[in-house]
Amino acid sequence: MIASPLQIDFPESLPVSGKRDEIMAAMQAHQVIIVCGETGSGKTTQLPKIALAMGRGLLNYPKTLANGRPAPRGKLIGHTQPRRIAASSVAKRIAEELKTPLGDVVGFKVRFQDRLSKDASVKLMTDGILLAETQTDPLLSAYDTIIIDEAHERSLNIDFLLGYLRQILPRRPDLKIVVTSATIDAQRFADHFASKNGPAPVIMVSGRMFPVEHRYRPFEESREYDLNSAIADGVDELWRDPHNGGDILVFLPGEREIREAADHLRKHLSHQPIMRNAEVLPLFARLSPAEQDRIFDGHTGRRVVLATNVAETSLTVPGIRYVIDAGTARVKRYSFRSKVEQLLVEPISQAAANQRSGRCGRVANGICIRLYDQKDFDGRDRFTDPEIIRSSLAGVILRMKSLHLGIVEDFPFLERPSGRAIADGYQLLNELGAVDDANELTPLGTELSRLPLDPRVGRMLLEARGREALDEALIIASALSVQDVRDRPMEAQQQADTAHKKFDDEKSEFVGYLKLWKWIGSMTPAVAMARNTSSPTANTNNCCAKTSSTSAACASGKTSTASCTPWWPSTSGA
């Protein structure tokens, strides 16, 4: 906590700053408000500061009572983000604006990382962290204000949180809820939180400040011309004029596509006299924090940032003048027939495409090149399907049972899941022994609900504990709960394959995970540190280790469930 009074300034260049009086008045008069604004409106960074200025947050609570006795502990301003990278970067940005060290007044907590002092007032976190806290703090009494950011993404966590918050509001009259959304179906959120006085108020905030020109550049893929060629042509078109030196943001569906495009683009630009010194930076969730932070570093030359949809709404990449949109994203789909969830590359919705184009036009007139035609755009779905209607509900049902929230059919979801999805979730839990034939939670199901894992993986651990195979099962469960720890960069595929071959096993890929873990454990700390920066498994060794230790602690009851994030898989929790 800081000793001197906090100086809170609101940049007048941000549209939300001009609405702060209206937002404050609405928060005073209503328990829930919806703040709806386009990309670049400043709502993510300024809303916590508005709450602080209203007297909310820990630092605004008295330390002692009138009689000199210590006052009850104050409450936090909670601010959720769909992704870890967004939670950490937003916390750093707000702390900078308040001129305080990260963690003192504003900090963040994500899975495996906690930068929050005991006297902090604003807590950035993933929505999964807040959801996990409902197990130990059902009324979320640690908070006086909760900001649910990027609600339009409609992840499973967000939809569940919005339903949960609506249920506890009557028992927490002091709690203020702010739901933020891009200009996408805001009325649905207002109706969801309707009270006897009508729907929750919606405050519209402008965002994009300069016009954006859309150029459609469809291409026909062939052996000689592919997506990477189309991106290179798009860069050439945007930078053809030597005076057009603004940065370019390219949207691609995943890490593999980003690595391939980056390799192709670097080679392409190396032959261009004007552009050979341009910087090409990747941006995806599996990068280290230091690598992710490079996009915020100041620079004087040209830059191309290749990103997944993490840059669609969660992060604002500075200095972007142009966008190239491949028009696709990786979307999780659950198959009722095969009981398997897959990440499939699919065309994005119109709303997502408009979000992407909104990333340019913030510093000057923008240009968005779409690598598909306008007829294709016009034929796409208006909105992205909410995650709840394309996911297994087994994890949701198990969480609801453990929190005694009643039957899933009566829960106030924004979008009610289908009867088939509910039946499938109950069936899977019954097969795992988590619910009985009357769909009531069993003792095993109670244990399973405490594990931060997919129910099927958690069941594997509980069985392994009884069979004295927990150590091996934890390693396998950890490997199944993170992205593949084996890295295969485009520029070193053969070397990576050679390095990975030593861990292959003819009988089982799971045994290969055990071999890899044993190899990592056999290294001395000095060797491990050196190899952890260059080995083909460097990116996620630590993540896998932390997943293993957290799962073990939860399985044995040695840690608070608040540190165990919800275990239903979510594409937005990257």
Image (spheres, grey):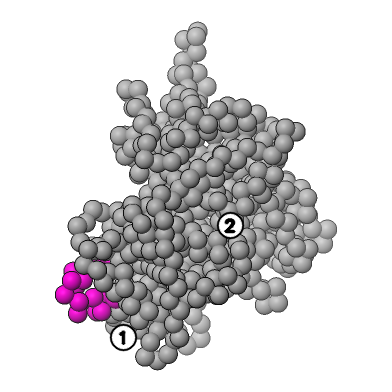
Q: What crowding class fits label 1: few (fewer than 14 Cα within 10 Å), some (14-19), or many (20 or more)?
A: few
Q: Residue at x 72, y 48 (%)?
A: 412
Which x, y percent locates residue 43? 46, 43
Magenta residues (range): 265-281
- Residue lying furthest bottom: 223
Q: Is residue 376 above or below residue 453?
A: below
Magenta run includes residue 276? yes
Which residue is label 2 attached to? Answer: 155
Q: Is residue 131 left or right of residue 163?
A: left
Which dot, 1 or 2, sits closer to the camera? 2
Q: Secondary structure at mark 1?
A: helix
Which residue is label 1 attached to? Answer: 494
Q: Residue at x 49, y 50 (%)?
A: 38
- Check disc 1 and give the amino acid type: Gln
Which x, y percent locates residue 374? 52, 73
User: Count of labels shown?
Assistant: 2
Q: What crowding class fits label 2: few (fewer than 14 Cα within 10 Å), some (14-19), or many (20 or more)?
A: many
- Residue lying furthest top: 67
Query: Which is more toward the observer, 267 or 531?
Result: 267
Q: CA distance from mark 1 to mark 2?
A: 37 Å
- Residue lying furthest right: 438
Which x, y percent locates residue 392? 66, 65
Q: Is residue 328 above or below residue 387?
A: below
Q: Residue at x 48, y 25 (%)?
A: 55
Quadrant holding the N terminus: top left
Query: Which is more toward the observer, 72 or 469?
Result: 72
